[in-house]
Image: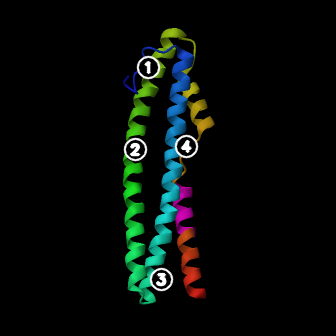
Amino acid sequence: MDPTDLSGLDASSARDYVTQFMVTLRTTRAELTKLGEERAKWEGRIKLAVEGGRDDLVASARERLADVQRRVGVLAAEEQELVAQLSILRDQLRRLQQRFDPTIDTEQLLAQLEAAVGERDELADQFKELQESGRALQELKER
């Protein structure tokens, strides 16, 4: 079955399916945020190891950082695919809702789904990353 095909579902099942897609997208974005924090941690550790002249630790930390960056790449691609699929599903859900009950305001329904699932706050993510960098810098200064 095509994951973006709602044609075989009734309106309620289609809405539930789209909601699950939105939850999956939100979970993926949360994982990306965690990986961003982990990436910052390993970048800080690399810097500390370089400053301490610990080439053995630098190599290990770079390997870990490369692994984290690989996982970020995989999840970022998954996120992009989910966003594209969700856009298609939203359009199909609108058409399906109008076919079953043209009195339903699909825009309002989608807004309610987004409110229930939540949207990614990219500004908060950027501030969180900045805050993590500040903490890492403060730890370095204290050492």
Q: Which residue occupies 50% across, 64% down?
A: 38
Q: Distance from label 2 to label 3 (Cα)? A: 32 Å
Depth check, mark 3 against mark 4: the one in front is 3
Q: Are marks 1 and 2 in contact (CB under 8 Å)?
A: no
What's the mark number on residue 78?
Answer: 2
- Dot 4 falls on a residue whose secondary structure is loop
Q: Is residue 136 above or below residue 6?
A: below
User: Distance of mark 1 from mark 4, alpha carbons?
Assistant: 23 Å
Reply yes or no: does residue 140 show up in magenta: no
CA gap between label 1 and label 2 equals 21 Å
**Front one among 135 and 20:** 20
Kindly report the secondary structure that dominates the magenta region of the rendered protein: helix
* Quarter of the view holding residue 55: bottom left
Gap in Å between the C-alphas at discs 1 and 3? 52 Å
- Work out which quarter of the rendered image holds the N terminus and state it: top left
Numbered range of the magenta stretch: 123-131
Mark sitting earlier along the chain (1/2): 1
* Mark closer to the observer (4, 2): 2
Mark toward the start of the polypeptide (3 vs 4): 3
| Res 48 label | 3
Q: Label 4 belongs to which residue? A: 119
Mark-to-mark CA distance, 3 and 4: 36 Å
In the foreground, 115 or 37:
37
Residue 42's x, y, as percent? 46, 71
- Nearer the N terminus, badge 2 or badge 3? 3
Residue placed most toward the observer, 36 or 55: 55
